[in-house]
Structure formats: structure tokens, C-alpha cells
Image (cartoon, coloured by chain):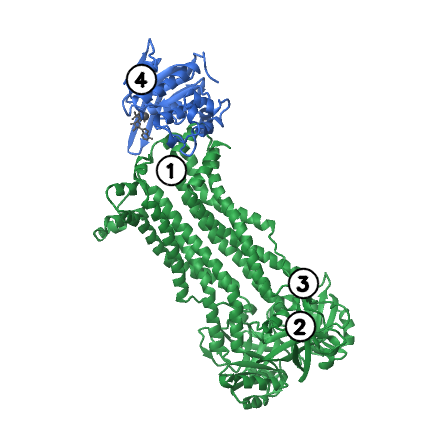
Chain colours: A green, B blue
Amino acid sequence: MRALDQKLLRDLMRLRGVVLAIALVLVGGISTFIMSLSTYDSLVLTQAKYYRDHRFAQVFVSLKRAPESLQRRFLDIRGVDKVETRVVAAVNLDIPGFADPVSGQLVSVPDRGEPLFNALYLRRGRMVDPARDDEVVISESFANAHQFRLGDALSVTVNGRRKAVTIVGIVLSPEYIYEIQPGAVFPDYQRFGILWMARAPLAAAYDMEGAFNDVALSLTADANHDDVIDRLDEFLRPYGGRGAYGRQDQLSHKFLAEEFGQLETMATVFPVIFLGVAAFLLNVVIGRLINTEREQIAILKAFGYRNGEIGWHYTKFSLMIVAIGLAGGVVVGIFLGKGMSAVYQDFYRFPFLEYELKMSVVVNAALVAVAAGLAGTLTSVARAVQLPPAEGMRPETPTEFRATLVERAGLQRWFAQPTRMIMRHIERRPLRALLTVLGIASACGVIMVSNFQEDAIHHMIDVQYGMSSREDLSVSFVGPTSARALQSLKGVAGVAHVEGFRSVPVRLHFEHRSFRTALQGVESDGELHRILDKDLRRIKLPAAGVVMTDYLAKILGMKAGDWVTVEVLEDSQPVLRATGFARPKTFQFADVLAGSQPALRLPLVATTKQYLGVSAYLRRNVLNRLLEEGDVINGAYISTDSRYQSKVYSRLKDMPRVSGTVIREAAIAQFNQTMEQTILFFTMVTASLGAVIAFGVVYNSARIALSERGRELASLRVLGFTVGEIAYILLGELALLTLMALPIGFMFGRALCAYLVSQFESDLYRIPLILEPDAYSFATMVILTSAIISGYLVWRRLRCLDLIAVLKMRE
Amino acid sequence: MSTTGANGVVFQTRGLTKVYDMGEVQVHALRGVDIDLYGGELLVLLGPSGSGKSTLLNILGGLDTASAGQVIYRGRELTTASDSELTEYRRHHVGFVFQFYNLIPSLTARENVAAVTEIARSAMAPADALTLVGLSERVDHFPAQLSGGEQQRVAIARAIAKQPSVLLCDEPTGALDSTTGIVVLEVLERINRDLGTTTALITHNADIAAMADRVVRLADGRIVDVHRNVEKKPARELRW
Ligand SMILES: Nc1ncnc2c1ncn2[C@@H]1O[C@H](COP(=O)(O)OP(=O)(O)OP(=O)(O)O)[C@@H](O)[C@H]1O
Ligand SMILES: [Mg+2]
């Protein structure tokens, strides 16, 4: 080995504490990078493979009813490749020993052969026997939630008729990776399940013999997605088509896409912080190393080492640290990536997981790490290279000190000599002090992110369920029903308050943008379901127009006063489809109500703050008039007397027209539980990474300070100062910087959270920027703990400071 | 290669001037030095502190550049050489020995020598160079494990291992007691004699001048006296 490389290795060994601290920060950056990207790649790959192997359809549409003979005619629609019709029924379930109402979706599987689309993955048991009308297979999440075993019996209410069925298999479906009840915001695996039954018996039970009400399609390679959807809508209009949609609007797929997008954001934000801090640490350490080795550099130059050779030597030093960090980061990253992928696999119930670490991810990690390493090193190395050989032999001229601001302000008599030394040091190297502060602040920010999600989600739930959706449960009816049904609901013992609503699936258009959602007709002064403004104050629904979730208005690019075009996607209703979306010149709400407008257009009156989902609200009586129907509802919000809750549930189960029930408390509990698993992992990872940064920065600063000031401190010891007193001079400076870093860290953390919030915005949910005091105190605690630990490590060194050696040393 | 037998002029300086510009004040370290160094000769530079000895030696060795005047090394102008030409010059022609040894503390004696031989064209093996200075037993010791005299001998081994044509020593015995100093001087004397390396040696100690071929005295940046020793005294017989 070359002598200089030997020196390199020995220097690395000698400075191992510092080297490890920097490497650790690098490990943090590289591992989050690898973790997030490999998890992302693995999930995308797994999803793609799952979709391919199980033939996930490309376009979906449900309708009221169409004869089976129509199936062949789909193929005449330009762009449609293959088609499969199905029967899908909303059902109520009765589970022995479980009092709460449970609803489900019963989906047909072909009587013969494999389904063309959305093939099931059989986990346990077998598929249904088409000859039997009492067999179902059920989704695994549902099975797990109730600990169902093969052979267990359920009773299913289809179309108001009860039917006993037996579970013969437990399956997964690419269509329901994310399993959620229509209208609900969170998955609730106990109260909503997907079941599959053979087509013939299901059709018989659902009055769909020789007919279908759901279609899955694939497109030809050259098909224009949007055109096909338009043609399909046209084609299915006579059959009560509810609007075709592609994968990007398919709920399960959409949720996955959101989630994957977040992972990608994570894969950039955190590594950037870590690598930035690592670059700064390298800069300080290499800078210090080069300072102490001025003479050696001069000697090497005197003997004819070229600038490039010397520069390369010190560059190698930092690259070695980068290499250690990279190796550790890749190993930890793979470990965390596998862990995180497993968490997600479990969460999404992928039948398998293809863990994939792309070579390009590792290469990118390496490039980024090397870039950070070089960025941190180059200025110092350039300084080393420029050092004239004769110059290096002379000791560095004593640094100029000056009276600090405090002293110039005449305040020095308030401070003891050691305190003045601290202040002078900070003022002497303001840039380094600043960078140290920023390093600690970024650690603080990262830790705040770890805690923020939990606070934000609690707030989200408080607002959603405490202020807006205050009902204990909501029921939906199998179809539009006379508002008189409310009377029978009110009559149920234990029901305290009932409010009917009319919800209709729509596609909203504004300019060239459109969005599929539900138009909710609610009571204008509803007690249970309240509309909130941006300051979370309750607002009364106006008579003339719609109120939209602020996020929906943003998606559509609308502001109050704009007119939205509404395309109603409900069977049996005259579909008010707009021909041209240009805004009419004179347009009065009265005209809309009078039905003298060709397309249904409504003015946007106000926006409402909502963190979950997106919807558009208007008064129910207005919606009824627009739909040219009577006093009609298709669901109700109910508040109950908690003592009678189970009685209410069992009465609801017996009501034939009630097709689905969402129980608020159960939904919250379920949500908390699901979030907790993923968030806990995230919080742990982020908080420990933040701690690593804090430790890295404080420890390094302390070590560097010790190396720079060892002589000075030893001299003080010789003069009779105690270890405690010199520790105060050294560590007091760091304590001061750490304390200064906290408020900056708070601001940084807030900004970081704000950035993440903006990145994580989706139509499923918007996380509010809420930071409770505990987020601040937690970050403070972690930072102080890391600072104290690194302080302790340095203090141990101070205690055994070799006075003689330090004084003999030639600086 | 060594310059045995080559008694031509190795260095020639004419009107060599060095001014350090310190802002308000200008320090005249050299005020027109004219001197010739001959192949294989051992030259001792004497002079009070601040007289410009180190400055002269550094310029000769290509560590520093002159403000005015000329330095010619074997017919090549050093004064107009670029930074990288000076580096190549030092790499292949010059060996330095400094007062404070300036060994690399994290390298052993052998490695300290190897650091220089690795980049030289026709170097001797580091162990051989250490044997020349009488340290064959201590090759694997770190500087901290060696006495000052031993460290200085390692520094000499390092300087001569690449067989430079000139050896420039700035107070090589300055930090040593007389006995150890003499051991070091004996080594320099032997290198000069056996390898024929042109050697310039700075010292504050007039007694050392007795071992030189020529003695040059500097004062206030000028040469004040050049004296040729008719009879060189072996380093072994020096006393101070
Ligand atoms: N880098 C520099 N900047 C400014 N002045 C310098 C510098 N180097 C040397 N000098 C000045 O130049 C003059 C000559 O210095 P030089 O080091 O050559 O003296 P010297 O004869 O070697 O002295 P000593 O015996 O003390 O080593 C001195 O006055 C010194 O202060
Ligand atoms: Mg000198």
C-alpha cells in the first residue's frame, strides 16, 4: 500500500469517533433514500405484476340493468378490446355474534372458467361451485377482521331477501387492494366486506337473470381512454349507466397511487436534509483536519507532491467516509425497505411482494452521497492545495480575537471570564456557528415531522367527526326513497335525531376540468351534518347554488360565482348532459330551477373546509327539484342514544331498504388502528433519524472544538481550572448553539411539515398543518438528549486530557 | 542521479531579492544575493536570526519564489518557472531537512521515507536509506516512538532516499543536543561524501562551519562574507 494511503487509514482510525458520527448521518440519508425508493419500486412492481397476473381491468362502469345480449355490442365500441359483464349487489350481512350492522358488496364470478378480469387470488379454501347457490368466497381482510374460518356460515340480505351462505374460500382481489365502502372515508374491515358468488345464483337472487349491472373492460393499444369513456357513457345511457371510469378513478387504485406518490416525496425530502447536514459535517471535519496537517501538507509539497495528489489524498478521506456511510446506508436501507414493504404488503394485502432494489437506486444514492461528500470537502481541499509549501512550515498566525458585541455593548461585567470565552468563540467563527445551528435545527425539524402526522390526524378526526359529521351512524337506502322513511327511522327506539339526505353520483365540469364525486343534498340547517367554512365556523347552506369542499374547487379551478356543469350519473334519472360547456351569457339560478336550461349548471356559492374526501353540497329540496323528483332521500344521518345502540342496529338490519350503514365510532377506531401501524413505523424511523443528525452535529462540533482548543483548555487546567470549568467553556458553547437552534428548528419543522402537507394533498384526504405543543416538546427532548449524550462523550475525553502531551505538541 | 564528480555550477543566483509585502511595511528578506554553489560541495550558511538564510534556502529549493533577480539551477531558470515546474523540480532534484523534522506522525519511519520514494524516479529502498542513517533497527517505529535525533535521521533518510542532486538543510541540529547533533551531522557528511550530493546547511552554530567546504555569512539579506575552509574538520571532531 502507498504510504499516503496508509496515512489515510490511520487518520480514519484515529478520528473514528468523528468518522462514525458523519457516516451515521450519511447512513440516515442513504437509508431513507434506499428505503423509500426500494419500497416504492417494490410496491409499483408488485402492483404491476399483481395487476397483470390477475388481469386488473382498465375501465369500469356500473349501470342499473342491461340484458346480457348487449355484451357483444360493447365490442363494437371503438377502443374496447375485451369485455366482461358482472352482477354486483350491495348487501347487508348478518354475522353471528356481531351486533353492528355490516354491509358488503357481492360480486359475481363467471360460472364457467376463469374471469376475464380481476381474477381472484385464492388464499385458502376453494372457489365457489357454480352449481350451488349458497357458497361464497370472501376477502381476506374481512375474514381476518372476524376471524372467519372455512365452512363458517353467514346470512346475506340481497334485495331484501335473506339468504344463508357458507364461506368456502378466502381470496384477494386486485380490484379491492384497498377495500372501502362507497361513501365511507376509511376502510372498516369489520363492517364492510367483499364477497364473491357464482353468477347464476347471484343473478337469481338479485333479479338479474339474463342481465348484468356491472362491466369491466380492457382497451386496445391505440384506444383513447377519454373517448372510450364518452362512448361508453353514451352507449349505456338507456340502461342507467353510472358513468364509466378508468383506473385512475378506481378507488382502490387511486388510493394506492396517492400512497406511492407520498413515498416518492419522502424519498427526496429526507435524504436531501441528511446529505446536506453530512456535507456540512464533512466540511468542518476535513477543514479541521487540513488545518492540523498544514505542516504535513507543506512537507509533502516540499518533496514534490503535486497539488492534484494532495487534493486527491484529502478527497479520498472524505470519500472513505462516504463509502462507509454508503455501505451502511445500503444495508440499513435494504433492511428498512424490506420492513416497510412488508408493512405495506400487509396493509394492502398484496398476495406476494416482489422486493426490488434497483441497481439504479443504489447508483443514484452513491452519486448523491459522493456529491454531498465532495461539496463538503472541496473548499477545504482547495485551501490545502493552495497552501504555499514554505508557508505551511510556519505555525498559523494566532487568530485575531476581538471584543464581542456583548462586550462592546459594555455588558461584560455581567459575565464571568469563561462565558466571555464562549461568546468570543462563537463570534470568531460565525459561519461555522451558524451552520452548526442550522444542522441541529434541521434535526429538530425532522423530528417534528415524525410527530406531526399524529397530531394532524387527530385534528382531522376532531374536525371531521366532532364538528362536521356528528351523526353516530349513517344509513343508505337501496334506492331513492320517499322522505317518509325518515318517520319510521325516527320511530325506532333509541334513535334521537334523524336527518335525511339525497346523494347522487355526478361528474362535475368546469372549463376543461372534470371530477367524479357525489352531489349531496342535505338539510340547510342540519344539526348532524354541518358545513364548515375555512375557519371551521358552521355555515348555513345557501338556497341558490352549491357549496364545495375547498379542495374540489381547487381541482376544478373554480371560485365563488363560477358556474359548474353537473352531469348526473344516476340510473332512472334523466341524464342532464351538457353539450357545450361554455358559460351562458345570462344565467339565473331561477332558470335552473325552472328547468329552462339545457344542461344542469349551478353556481358555486362558497367553499367548505373538509379534510376527508371531496363533495359538493346543496339543499336537499333544491336537489330534489333539479332531479325532478318529489320529497326523496336515499340515506339518513342518525344520532342515537348510546344505551340503545345495539337495539337500533338490529332494527336497522331488519329494514329491507337499508343497504349500508356506517358507524362513526367504529370508523374512527378502525382508522386510528390502521394509521397507527404505518405511522408508528414512520415516526420511529424519522425520530431516530433526527436523533442521529442531532447527535452527529453536536458530537462533531464538540470534537472539533476539543481538537482546536485542547491546548488552550489544557493550559487552563495547568493554571488550576477544574474539569468542570473547562467543560463549561467547551460544552457551554455547544449548549448555547443547541438552544439557539431550537426555535429555528421549530420554524424549519413547521415549514417542512407545510411542504409535506402540500405534497400529500389528495382527494382522499388533506392533512391539516397542525402542530401541537407535544410535537415541539418531543423534538426538544430528542435534541437535548442527543446533545447531552455527545456532551458526555466529550466530557469523558476532557477528563483524561493529557496535559503534558497537549502542551508539548507543536501547533 | 547523483552528481558525483560533477564539479560544475549547480546553483547560480544573481541579484536575488525577496520582499515580503506586509501591507504597511515591506520586509526585505534578501537584498541582492549573488552566490554560486558547486557540485558535490558542502556549504554552510551562517547568520543572525532574520538575516534571510531560510528565505534563500527556500528559494533555492523551489519552495518560494524571488521578488527579483535570478536563480539558475543547472542552466535552468527557477525564477521564471511555474508552480507545477517547481513541483517537478522539487520532486526529482531536491531533498529537504528541516529543524523540526516534520515527519508525518501517522506513518512509521519506513513509510515516511516511502512517501517520498514512491513518487521519485530512481530512489533507493526506504530500508536502505534508513540503514544509511543508522536506523535499520527502527524502521517500523512511529515518530512519536523515536528520539529527536532519530527523528531527524529519519528526516535525512527521507531527504536522501530519492538520491537528490541537492540537499537543503535548515538548522538540522537546531533542536538537538550536541552529541545527537554530531551524529546527524556525521550522516550528512557521509551522504555528501559518498553520494556526492551538493549540500547547503543552515546553522546558528559557528562551530559547525568547520566541517564545510565553504562558509557563507549573511546579514540583513546580504552576503557579508564567503570563506573557504582549507581543511575540513570531520563532523565527529566537532564540539560545542
Ligand atoms: N512569510 C513571511 N512574511 C513576512 N515576512 C517574512 C516571511 N518569511 C520571512 N519573513 C521575514 O524575512 C526576514 C528573513 O527571514 P528568514 O526566515 O529568512 O530568516 P532566517 O535567517 O532564516 O532567521 P532564523 O535564523 O531566525 O530562522 C525576517 O525578517 C522575517 O521576519
Ligand atoms: Mg530560518
**SS under mark 4:** helix
Residue A51: numbered disc: 3
**Residue linked to disc 2:** A150
| Point 52% across, 65% down: residue | A677
Q: Amino acid at mark 4?
A: Ile
Residue in the foreground of this view, choosing between B36 and A234: B36
Q: For marks 3 and 1, give the CA distance.
A: 60 Å
Q: For marks 2 and 4, give the CA distance.
A: 104 Å
Q: Are marks 3 and 2 in contact (CB under 8 Å)?
A: no
Please tell me how crowded label 2 is: few (under 14), some (14-19), or many (20+) other residues with Cα within 10 Å: some
A263 in relation to A137, above or below = above
Lower position in the chain sequence, tag 2 or tag 1: 2
Q: Quadrant of ligand 1?
A: top left
Residue A292: numbered disc: 1
A339 in relation to A532, above or below = above
Q: Amino acid at mark 2?
A: Leu
* Total marks in image: 4
Lower position in the chain sequence, tag 3 or tag 2: 3
How far across and down, in percent of the image, does residue A622 sit? 57, 84
Residue A293 seen in the current view: yes
Q: For marks 3 and 2, give the CA distance.
A: 26 Å
Q: Amino acid at mark 3?
A: Tyr
Describe residue A214's horizontal placement relative to residue A259 as left or right.
right
**Residue linked to disc 4:** B208
Residue in the foreground of this view, choosing between A81 and A433: A433
How far across and down, in percent of the image, does residue A189 sit? 59, 73
